[in-house]
Image (cartoon, rainbow, N blue to C red):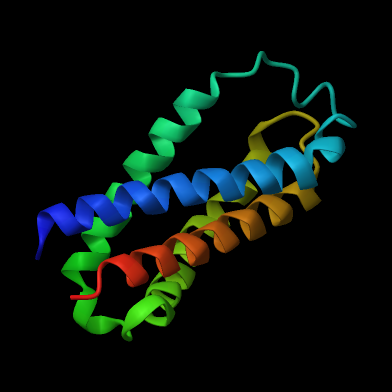
Amino acid sequence: MNWSKAILAGVVAGIVVNVSDFVMHGLIMGETYTKYPTVFSQEQASPLYFAAISVCIGITAAILFAKTRGSWGAGWQGGATYGFFLGLVAFFPNFYDSLVIADFPYYLSWCWGGITLIGAVIGGAVLGAIYKS
């Protein structure tokens, strides 16, 4: 495993997923969130925290990808396949929110699961494009 390449791929994938999450949560779903002031009533966190967490997740995903590289196809397609399966693992915990957050709409669990899955596929494709061997 090439550690520097894995970390670089993870940082880039984390940044790309952070931007895609901003587009999906901020631009596409933003108006939906304003309809639920009781659910989303806390103060916003700094965007830098979200970026830092995305990079940490990206690096972790990249190390796992690099360790299992032989199991996935070549290039971005193999990375997208990896991202799909990683996204499935992250998809289902989104249903926990509707169980523990008062007034959290059930359909948002599906939306967040889908956003998580899409982000994982995008991040995986970036990993596959950067970490080729």
Residue drawn 72% across and 38% down? 26
Numbered circles on residues, count? 0
Whole-percent x, y for residue 8 in the image: 25, 51
Whole-percent x, y for residue 93 in the image: 54, 51
Q: Extreme top residue here?
A: 43
Q: Nearer the viewer, residue 112 or 52?
A: 52
Q: Nearer the viewer, residue 47 or 41?
A: 47
Whole-percent x, y for residue 107 in the image: 79, 52
Residue drawn 37% across and 50% down? 12
Describe residue 85's horizontal placement relative to residue 25 as left or right.
left
Name which quarter of the figure residue 54 lies in.
top left
Which corner quadrant holds the C terminus?
bottom left
Describe residue 51's horizontal placement relative to residue 73 as left or right.
right
Which corner quadrant holds the N terminus?
bottom left
Residue drawn 90% across and 32% down? 35
Describe residue 4's horizontal placement relative to residue 50 as left or right.
left
